[in-house]
Image (spheres, rainbow, N blue to C red):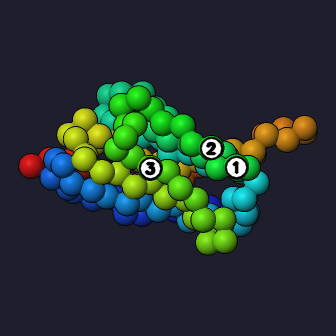
Amino acid sequence: QVQLVESGGGLVQPGGSLRLSCVASGFRIGNYGMSWYRQAPGKERELVAAITSIGGTTNYADSVKGRFTISRDNAKNTVYLQMNSLKPEDTAVYCCNALRREIVGTRNYWGQGTQVTVSS
């Protein structure tokens, strides 16, 4: 059974840090591009950070550049999101995504998400 399970969310004060983890099961992430998305109440889901399967090239939303870092450990089948200097506007449900485009179609998996709340 394919699963992505996020953890590490919680309540943190502005300026604080959190590290999110996303553990995959039922498939190997090594051949997948991995991403973190977030969705705040009343807002559309947005891409926060992404890392390619080969080479580990990363991309970030402008709003998190310099504060967030995405990384992957293929041996542990896990992707991480280190979040520093958190702001109240970072409050959202953060979800992990695995994407692989094949000739015959696309494999696209989502986790359930973990809540991040930044508040004093």
Q: Is residue 67 above or below residue 24?
A: above
Task: Give amino acid for label 3.
Answer: Thr
Badge 2: how crowded within 10 Å, few (<14), some, or many (20+)?
A: few
The N terminus: image quadrant: bottom right
Which amino acid is tagged 1? Answer: Gly
Other-residue count near label 3 (Cα within 10 Å), few / some / many at <14 / 14–19 / ≥20: many
**Disc 2 designates what residue?**
57
Dot 3: element: strand
> Could you tell me residue 61's position as x and y percent?
45, 32
Upstream in sequence: badge 1 or badge 3: 1
Badge 1: few (under 14), some or many (20 or more) residues near its Cα, within 10 Å?
few
Q: Is residue 31 left or right of residue 19?
A: right
**According to the image, label 1 marks what residue?**
55
Looking at the image, is mark 2 or mark 3 earlier in the sequence?
2
- Could you say which disc has been placed on residue 68 in the image? none
Q: Residue at x 40, y 55 (%)?
A: 82
* Total numbered labels placed on residues in the image: 3
Question: Measured along the vertical axis of the image, is residue 53 above or below residue 90?
Answer: below
Secondary-structure class at tag 1: loop
Name the side, left or right, on which 84 lies relative to 65.
Answer: left
Q: Residue furthest bottom?
A: 76
Give the CA distance from mark 2 to mark 1: 6 Å
- Residue at x 20% of width, y 40% of height: 88
Marks 2 and 1 in Cβ contact (< 8 Å): yes
Instruction: State the image coordinates of residue 112 (x, y, percent, origin top left).
Output: 49, 53
Amino acid carrying mark 2 in the image: Thr
The residue under the point 49% across, 51% down is 70
Residue 24 in the image, given as x and y percentages of width and height = 62, 64
The residue lying toward the viewer, choosing from 11 and 83, is 83
**Which residue is located at x 30 percent, y 51 percent?**
84
Q: Which residue is mark 3?
A: 69
The location of residue 87, given as percent across then percent down, is 22, 41
